[in-house]
Image (cartoon, rainbow, N blue to C red):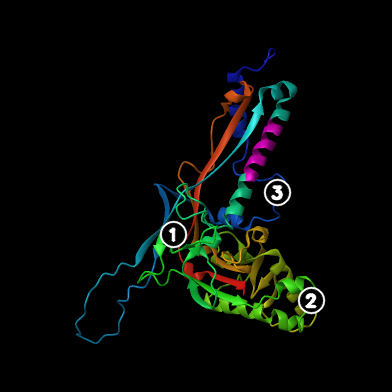
Amino acid sequence: MANGTPDSELLDLINATLPWFDKLSFGAPQKYTNYPILNKVLNNGLTLGGGKYAQVQVVIKPSGQAQFTQMYATKTYNQVDTIKIATAPWARLTTHWLWDRRETLENRDAQQIVDIMKTRRIASQSDMANKFEEAAWQTIVTEADEFGSFRGIPYWISKGTSGGYNGVSTRDRAGTAITTVGAINGNTAGNEYWANYTQTYTNKIDDLIAGTVATSFIDDVNSMLAGMSTVYIMTNFRAPRTVEDLAAHNPLGNYTIYMDSQTNIVYDMCVRRHNIGQAFGYDLGKFNGQTAFNGTPIERVPQLDTYVDATITGLHPMYFVNHNEFKAIVLRGDEFYEHSPIILPESGGNVAAVNVDLSCQFLCKDRRTQGHLCAA
């Protein structure tokens, strides 16, 4: 390479370096301090899929065939269709990193070249992690999106205006109502269970953040705490009993309550006041050092600070997510697929690019086990 780096040698250099790198490495400085959805997905494992759509089987209702009977009584046999298929088009996520042939000339030490390439690769994959986590907290762009928006949690767990299984329809990012969720219409007879639980509470969050207390702190947060208890009970939410329950693939470790920053701050105020003697009830506290409700971990979601919308997510929302009923599905053969490097013609032949692609989707198998709470 004394007289320069030909295209073929530049591509060979990158190809020879790639096997030294770990796949799915997100060690670069992160945009967010926590990636709860991505971490859950990686801990629970990715499901490989195929075909034009990501899909998952949903038991939409009981068969209705159970009955008490008597000896020698006649019986009517009937096969009832209890299975539906929740589907969504693949969402396509892509990233890339670059290498200029002149950088090879400037960095003669082989280890230095490897280190620089590794840093760029990690940075590009970290950006992919950012996009994934952000999409996990948004609904779809439009129902007719042919390219397939990522179906985030607000798509599957929708808000309501009262208590009950009222989260039937959902909304797109413009606030337009969508009656079919995952290609299943919960308003259709026989699909009544295809809905999440909803509840509201009186909004005192903004006043409490501003330091304004209307009556007493306990009275101002009582509606919020009562709403949390209601959603928790009605969705049969669960909590880890031991630290070991938080390990990967443990069902009890897959229940989490998510909320925006301001709501999290106010809830943490409740925990601190409870710990110094103000009686809020036994359900407030911490588990394994993390703020919890009834022992279920609470996670702050900074994305909700940005994406919160009165129509779509509701104000100061809380999402009660049972991750046991969510599936992260990736298209077989396109799971973080790293292409061979290519020379970019527009660079005058100086720059090589490595593209990384992911076709994925986030599907819910049972909306009835999910809950939503927001300020009215």
Numbered tag placed on residue 212 in the rendering: 2
* Type of amino acid under label 3: Gln
> For the residue carrying disc 3, how many other residues have a C-alpha within 10 Å: few (<14), some (14-19), or many (20+)?
some
- As helix, strand or loop, the secondary structure at mark 2 comes to loop
Q: Mark 1 or mark 3: which comes first in sequence?
A: 3
Q: Is residue 305 above or below residue 204?
A: above
Query: Which of the two residues, 12 or 192, is positioned nearer the viewer here?
Result: 192
Q: Main secondary structure of the magenta part?
A: helix
Numbered tag placed on residue 30 in the rendering: 3
Q: Kindly give the residue lying farthest to the bottom in the view shown.
A: 70
Q: Which dot, 1 or 3, sits closer to the camera?
A: 1
- In the rendered image, the quadrant that contains the N terminus is top right
Q: Quadrant of residue 352?
A: top right
* Residue 268 location (% of width, % of height): 73, 71
* Type of amino acid under label 2: Thr
Q: Is residue 106 above or below residue 267?
A: above
> For the residue carrying disc 1, how many other residues have a C-alpha within 10 Å: few (<14), some (14-19), or many (20+)?
many
Q: Residue at x 62, y 42 (%)?
A: 125
Numbered tag placed on residue 294 in the rendering: none
Q: Residue at x 26, y 69 (%)?
A: 79
User: In this view of the protein, can residue 288 be seen by the observer?
Assistant: no
Q: CA distance from mark 2 to mark 3?
A: 35 Å
Q: What residue sits right under mark 1 in the picture?
A: 182
Can residue 192 be found in the magenta stretch?
no
* Type of amino acid under label 1: Gly
In magenta, the rendered stretch is: 114-127
Q: Residue at x 46, y 41 (%)?
A: 333
Q: Is residue 78 above or below residue 10?
A: below
Q: Which dot, 2 or 3, sits closer to the camera?
A: 2
* Residue 164 location (% of width, % of height): 50, 77
Q: Mark 2 or mark 3: which comes first in sequence?
A: 3
* Residue 72 location (% of width, % of height): 19, 85
